[in-house]
Image (cartoon, rainbow, N blue to C red):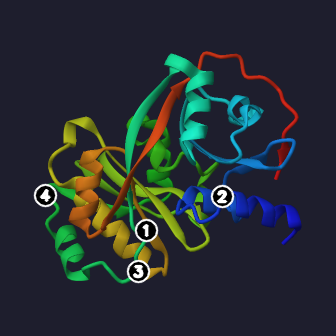
Amino acid sequence: MSWKSDNVKNIFGNWDETIIWSCLQGVMGEIHTNATDDAAMAILGDFAFYAGKPSEELVRFKPERLKQDFMILVPQNDAWAELIELYYGDNAKTVTRYAFKKESDIFDMRKLERAVLELPDGYELKLLEEQEYILCQNNKWANDLVSQFKDYDTYQKQGLGVVAYKAGELAAGASSYSRYNEGIEIEIDTKEAYRRQGLAYACGAKLILKCLEKGLYPSWDAQNMYSAALAEKLGYHFSHKYAAYEVRETHQTQTMNTAAY
């Protein structure tokens, strides 16, 4: 590992976040540093994590091929948060997210197996394969189940997922939002018409079982209290709340002298 790689790893320190690990390991995503190499940004999908000495250069920067209107920005500390608020202003909405401990051997296998068996009548669980990958791409509500994998071949190699069907219609799914060497970050989505029927619970349980079968850790980070409650029902233990910013950008992104890692 080069000195620069070590330096970037040290900037992020012990931040217990799999999206950062995906970027540092070179599995998915990108790392960018500022000109003085004392700040870094890990960016993958909708997420950007900022660490090191607060840098306006990085807060203003977005890689050309990753430009999009919506991002979730996660500051390492209050100083980064202030800088994000200063630059994005009213375009940055403060939200609370819920982190869960990454613990091995905590899952009650029998409970998870029962959750799968308790799938409501009329529904069928299937592994997320090529047909399901295409359906997820073509259904806006399900897009994030596969959106970070450029094609099915990539998903087949790096991803893992489960979907629920009803009468041939895609109703819900649990999949890898992202992948790192030791596991996945879980994404769960349910079509609005099929919510509150236990589908997320059954799909999540099945995906956790498949991950454990393959020696992968199924990491969970909750967007809201409903997702947090589901995580605890599946066996995860709450760690802490943290602040993030949902940004719908209207600023003109500027080109800056950042070094890609």
In this figure, which residue is indicated by the disc labeled 4?
A: 120
Query: The disc labelled 4 sits on which kind of residue?
Result: Pro
| In this picture, residue 36 sits left or right of residue 189 | right
Q: Is residue 52 above or below residue 68?
A: below
Mark 2 and 4 residues: CB-CB less than 8 Å, in contact?
no
Gap between marks 2 and 3, in whole Å?
23 Å
Mark 3 and 1 residues: CB-CB less than 8 Å, in contact?
no
Residue 51 position, x and y percent, is 65, 49
**Among numbered discs 4 and 1, the one appearing first in the sequence:** 4
User: 64 or 125: which is nearer to us?
Assistant: 64
**Among numbered discs 2 and 3, the one appearing first in the sequence:** 2
In this figure, which residue is indicated by the disc labeled 2?
A: 12
Gap between marks 3 and 4, in whole Å?
29 Å
Residue 198 position, x and y percent, is 17, 54
Query: The disc labelled 2 sits on which kind of residue?
Result: Phe
Q: Is residue 13 above or below residue 85?
A: below
Picture disc at residue 218: 1
| Residue 168 in view of the camera | no
Residue mark closest to the camera, 3 vs 4: 3
| In this picture, residue 229 sits left or right of residue 79 | left
SS under mark 1:
strand
**Among numbered discs 2 and 4, the one appearing first in the sequence:** 2
Assess disc 2: are there few (<14), some (14-19) or many (≥20) residues with their C-alpha within 10 Å of its C-alpha: many
Q: Residue at x 29, y 40 (%)?
A: 191
Q: Residue at x 23, y 49 (%)?
A: 166
Gap between marks 3 and 1, in whole Å?
10 Å
In this figure, which residue is indicated by the disc labeled 3?
A: 104
